[in-house]
Amino acid sequence: MNPAVRWNQIAAGPEEDIDLAEAALVIAAHENRDLDIAAYLARIDEIGAALRNRLRQDIGFTERILALNRYLFDELGFRGNVADFYDPRNSFLNDVLDRRLGIPITLSLIYVEVGRRIGLALHGVSFPGHFLVKCTLRDGVVVLDPYARGASLGLDELQQRLRVLRGGAEASPEDARRMLAVAGKKDILARMLRNLKAIYLERRDAPRALAAVERVIELEPGVAEEYRDRARIYLDLECFRAALSDLRSYLMLKPGAEDAAVVQRSVVALQQVAARLN
């Protein structure tokens, strides 16, 4: 199926029907139309089956986590791409599976998918600045960092990460716990696309940045900032009427925005440009 058509179905459908691995591969297929999505889904199944066949049926959850870490990171060699964190390939699940290099969110996706295939209740967590995974056990919750080879993170470490993000401002244990809510599937996909949008904007690749933000808007049509971002890309591409429409949508969705006055001035200027184009 055409990736644009399939993405529209995913975005419009209910969250519970989304296969995260498939959806992530559809994102990659926008840039690689020959991508065999079924083959990569089968590869994830094979990785999970190979590990599951090694484990005793009565093995505990902690032992399963340790086995998952050993298999993915020691044997298969999955790792974070520290040398080139902003390589777009780190955001494409097929490339992560092929190269065994990724960023926190794509490594977490693989970790969750393989972990579930060996009976672990794993969920993604949109922790600020760094995607994580949590596992619910009988006696509590374990927070794991697949970018750090599945390291278990205590509350102190999570607080420290928050302090760094806040420029040294204090972060309480309650602050850290609030950041550990399970990420919805559409939230995860939107975060992957926003990563790509930021990468392409930094590289001044407006067409690819536009494609990424358009898919975010399909997923989250009520997020005002995405229309503002798309308007800026349209301006770079000299698509003035499209930019005007998006800025109007931004103001309609967020009339009290801090930059509303600035955006309104841009709307007036673009109205004049559009009138001359007529």
Image (cartoon, helix red, strand yellow):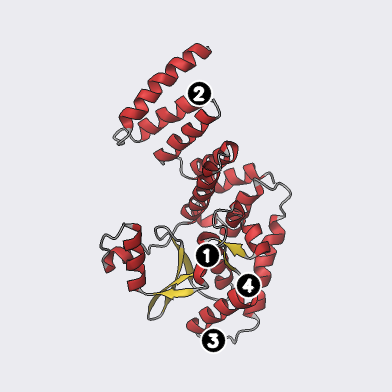
Residue sitting at x 42%, y 62%: 182
Mark 1–mark 2 CB contact (< 8 Å): no
Task: Determine the CA span between mark 3 and mark 4.
Answer: 24 Å
Residue type, mark 3 in image: Ile
- Which residue carries the number 1 mark? 108
Residue type, mark 1 in image: Ser
Residue sitting at x 40%, y 61%: 127
Query: Is residue 242 visible in the rendered structure shown here?
Result: yes
Q: Where in the figure is residue 218, as x and y percent of width and height?
A: 51, 41
Task: Tell me the quarter of the picture where residue 205 sits.
Answer: top right
User: Is 69 situated above or below 263?
Assistant: below
**Secondary structure category for the residue under label 1:** helix
Task: Determine the CA span between mark 2 and mark 4.
Answer: 47 Å
Task: Determine the CA span between mark 4 and mark 1.
Answer: 14 Å
Of badges 3 and 4, nearer the viewer stands 4
Task: Determine the CA span between mark 3 and mark 1.
Answer: 23 Å
> Which circle's residue, 1 or 2, is located before the other in the chain?
1
> Which circle's residue, 2 or 4, is located before the other in the chain?
4
Viewer-closest of 16 and 53: 53
Mark 3–mark 4 CB contact (< 8 Å): no
> Which circle's residue, 3 or 1, is located before the other in the chain?
3
User: Is 12 situated above or below 120?
Assistant: above
Of badges 2 and 3, nearer the viewer stands 2
Crowdedness of circle 3 by 10 Å Cα count: few (<14), some, many (20+)? few
Task: Tell me the quarter of the picture where residue 253 sits.
Answer: top left
- Which residue carries the number 3 mark? 59
The answer to whether residue 275 is left or right of residue 26 is: left
> Which circle's residue, 3 or 4, is located before the other in the chain?
3
- Which residue carries the number 2 mark? 240
Residue 191: numbered disc: none
